[in-house]
Image: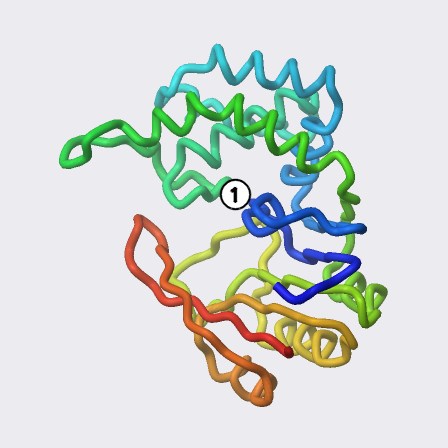
């Protein structure tokens, strides 16, 4: 990553990049998904974080737990209970998708260990580490393009990882999608106006290649649904 004073992720999701980078002076993350925001608010508070960890520790890796994590009244639940259900749906379902039932993930054979169970049992330690990393991070809850425009300064690095174009994937993946090409074009136009460094992730597509024809582009080996190999790309304006 290029040097920067301030760091912005307009589409945070799981936050793998921020959680693995060196802290910046100012860091801001954003997501429209209420469940994502609720989770990170819960783990930032000492008391609710410990309550969540306790519930995770005593929740077995079980099909029943997964099936019960889709209550009809999710918006009315206690924040900790809601966060636990979100973690169950994300960690026990295929593809880490939580907006719909994808099926309970299990290991049957051909692997040296039950990795899904191991991941679940390691989750309390992960929650603690993430909470520590988020202590000085600002959590926003606004449309991404609004944030991109309001952070238009030369010392702000934007890492942009939006929902990928529908034409490049097989199904809906997120609660808040970018379902039209026009939404992606609006985002691209905002990024083109940004005076600082920008990194944009996505699958290869004609729209991005056309609008970002002057940007540097690199391929990144990745895994798609059910661990199928897929190539992602990173567009950079620096």
171 on left or right of 41: left
Look at the picture and state if 220 lies above or below 191.
above
Which color scheme did the rendering employ for the protein? rainbow
How far across and how far down the image is residue 52, in percent?
61, 18
Position of 24 compared to 52: left or right?
Answer: right
Q: Quadrant of the C terminus?
A: bottom right
Residue tagged by mark 1?
99
Give the image location of residue 160, x and y in percent.
63, 63
Quarter of the N terminus within the rendering: bottom right
Q: Identify which residue, 112 or 68, lies in the foreground.
A: 112
Residue name at image x 79 percent, y 61 percent: 147
In the image, residue 85 above or below residue 160: above
**Residue 78: horizontal and vertical position, in percent?**
69, 20
Q: Secondary structure at mark 1?
A: loop
Which residue is at a point 70% across and 71% down the rendered structure image? 197
Q: Nearer the viewer, residue 118 or 13?
A: 118
Local crowd at mark 1 within 10 Å, few (<14), some, or many (≥20)? some
Residue at the image point whose x is 34% and y is 32% from the top: 104
Task: Write down the quadrant of residue 189 in the picture.
Answer: bottom right
């Amino acid at each position: 990553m290029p040097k920067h004073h301030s760091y912005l992720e307009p589409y945070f999701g799981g936050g793998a990049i921020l959680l693995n980078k060196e802290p910046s002076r100012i860091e801001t993350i954003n997501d429209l998904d209420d469940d994502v925001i609720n989770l990170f608010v819960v783990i930032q508070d000492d008391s609710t974080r410990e309550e969540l960890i306790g519930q995770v520790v005593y929740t077995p890796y079980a099909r029943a737990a997964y099936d019960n994590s889709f209550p009809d009244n999710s918006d009315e639940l206690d924040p900790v209970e809601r966060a636990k259900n979100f973690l169950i749906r994300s960690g026990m379902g295929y593809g880490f998708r939580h907006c719909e039932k994808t099926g309970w993930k299990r290991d049957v054979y051909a692997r040296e260990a039950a990795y899904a169970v191991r991941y679940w049992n390691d989750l309390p330690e992960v929650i603690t580490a993430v909470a520590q990393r988020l202590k000085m991070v600002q959590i926003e809850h606004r449309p991404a393009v609004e944030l991109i425009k309001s952070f238009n300064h030369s010392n702000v690095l934007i890492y942009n990882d939006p929902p990928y174009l529908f034409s490049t994937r097989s199904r809906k993946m997120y609660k808040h999608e970018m379902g039209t090409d026009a939404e992606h074009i609006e985002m691209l136009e905002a990024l083109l106006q940004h005076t600082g460094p920008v990194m944009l992730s996505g699958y290869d597509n004609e729209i991005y290649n056309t609008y970002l024809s002057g940007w540097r582009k690199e391929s990144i080996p990745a895994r798609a649904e059910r661990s199928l190999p897929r190539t992602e790309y990173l567009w950079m304006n620096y």
